[in-house]
Amino acid sequence: MDFEIPEEIRLLQDTIRRFVREVLHPVEAEIEEADQIPPHIVEELRKLGLFGLAIPQEYGGLGVSLLAQCVVFEELAKASLCFRSRVGTNNGIGSLGILFDGTEEQKRTYLPKLASGEWTGAFALTEPNAGSDAAAIETTAMPQGDAFLLNGRKQWITNADVAQVFTVMALTDREKRARGGITAFLVPRDTPGLTITKPHKTMGFRGSHVCDLIFEDAAVPVANVLGKVGDGFKVAMKVLDRGRLTMGAVCVGAAQRLLELSLAYAKRRVQFGKPIAERQAVQFMLADIATEIYACRGMLHETARRVDRGERLTKEVAMVKLHCSEMVGRAADRAVQIHGGMGYMRDCPVERYYRDVRLIRIYEGTSEIQRLIIARELLKGS
Ligand SMILES: Cc1cc2nc3c(=O)[nH]c(=O)nc-3n(C[C@H](O)[C@H](O)[C@H](O)COP(=O)(O)OP(=O)(O)OC[C@H]3O[C@@H](n4cnc5c(N)ncnc54)[C@H](O)[C@@H]3O)c2cc1C
């Protein structure tokens, strides 16, 4: 394994690291309170090009490698996870469908606006009766003239409150479902018949919101079909496959911040006449967090490099999502333990991370679904 990060990525890493420390850390508490990222911070994220990391330069993005994206997201996750979430859909589930399967016209219409952060993209697959079993969606898209009429409800869609365009999966053939019966559509926010609900109240991720989308005879032009009619399930799975890897980077970055906070606290908290960092029980927790970060960063970077070289690594990407998200859960638990009662207080960042990282074992495919994917791939090859 090659752990060296190329010089140009190192420079990007330094820039984001400084930005996180100087600009994002000071506003974390305010966001937690207000549940909103201040507009001037969104503007700063735009200026740094963070909305267009994954979008090629010809469409206005930075077009950096997947390894570079992982390095940037690791740094960004050292601040409140709402920042990564705000830029995350434009670099992942809200733009990749267009990048992978869009027509040239669709790419030219949407990607530059998503890359600059002028627009936000979102991805709508989940429904009240279709979560892990994505093929069970009930939203329909029936052809009518040169449009499709969409009817149904999409649930818990990240950034729906701020998005201008949604990649929406709908049934075009009830019988065929995942085997040719689901189609992906690009749906602008102002489409008549589309209602976006108020944000749900959630356990964490304050400053980042999820809403439902309700479609009532919403007419979407045929020109907005993404990929071929019937290929929507494939479009969705390709997008999710890629998104999962950068989620591993978020976990590594969050765990690293938890380690840094825990080290600092253990050195300054004195009990029984000594800093708690001098107690072996506390040292062991710090050692376990650090060891697991090292292992996860290794598997993350190795997988990113291989995907950058053109390999399709469904099994390894699922392994990264599974292992890194479980790892950060353990890191958050240990960090709270090291902080004692302080770790339970709302104004302590580890308390926020404890709630926020819980989500990562659930969305973009639960841990159980990652295990199913890994096992399926293993059995296929045996
Ligand atoms: C904050 C948040 C943001 C989200 N953002 C988006 C978004 O932007 N776009 C979008 O489309 N969706 C989004 N989602 C939805 C998310 O992807 C789903 O919640 C997730 O896929 C799990 O589906 P579910 O919640 O319906 O759980 P379920 O599928 O009902 O699962 C419940 C439990 O059963 C387990 N389970 C289910 N099937 C199996 C099986 N076959 N074998 C073993 N165990 C199984 C699961 O692992 C889980 O533990 C978001 C969700 C949240 C909470």
Image (cartoon, grey):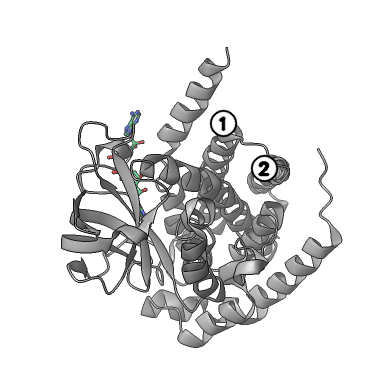
In the visual, does 51 lie left or right of 138? right
Residue 180 locus on image (x, y percent)? 33, 35
Residue 241 locus on image (x, y percent)? 51, 43
Residue 43 locus on image (x, y percent)? 54, 84
* Residue type highlighted by circle 2: Val
Mark yes or no: residue 194 visible: yes
Q: Is residue 349 above or below residue 381?
A: below
In the visual, does 80 lie left or right of 261? left
Question: Which residue extends farthest top?
Answer: 382
Q: Compare residues 154 and 203 and report the one nearer the observer.
A: 154
Q: Is residue 283 above or below residue 108?
A: above
For label 1, the SS is helix
Identify which residue is drawn at 69% across, 47% down.
290
Q: Compare residues 265 and 83 and report the one nearer the observer.
A: 83
Residue 270 locus on image (x, y percent)? 64, 63
In the visual, does 244 lie left or right of 65? left
Q: Which residue is mark 1?
A: 315
* Residue type highlighted by circle 1: Lys
Identify which residue is drawn at 44% across, 61% down.
344
Q: Which residue is mark 2?
A: 307
Q: Residues within 10 Å of mark 1 (few under 14, many from 20)?
A: some
Q: Is residue 306 above or below residue 10?
A: above
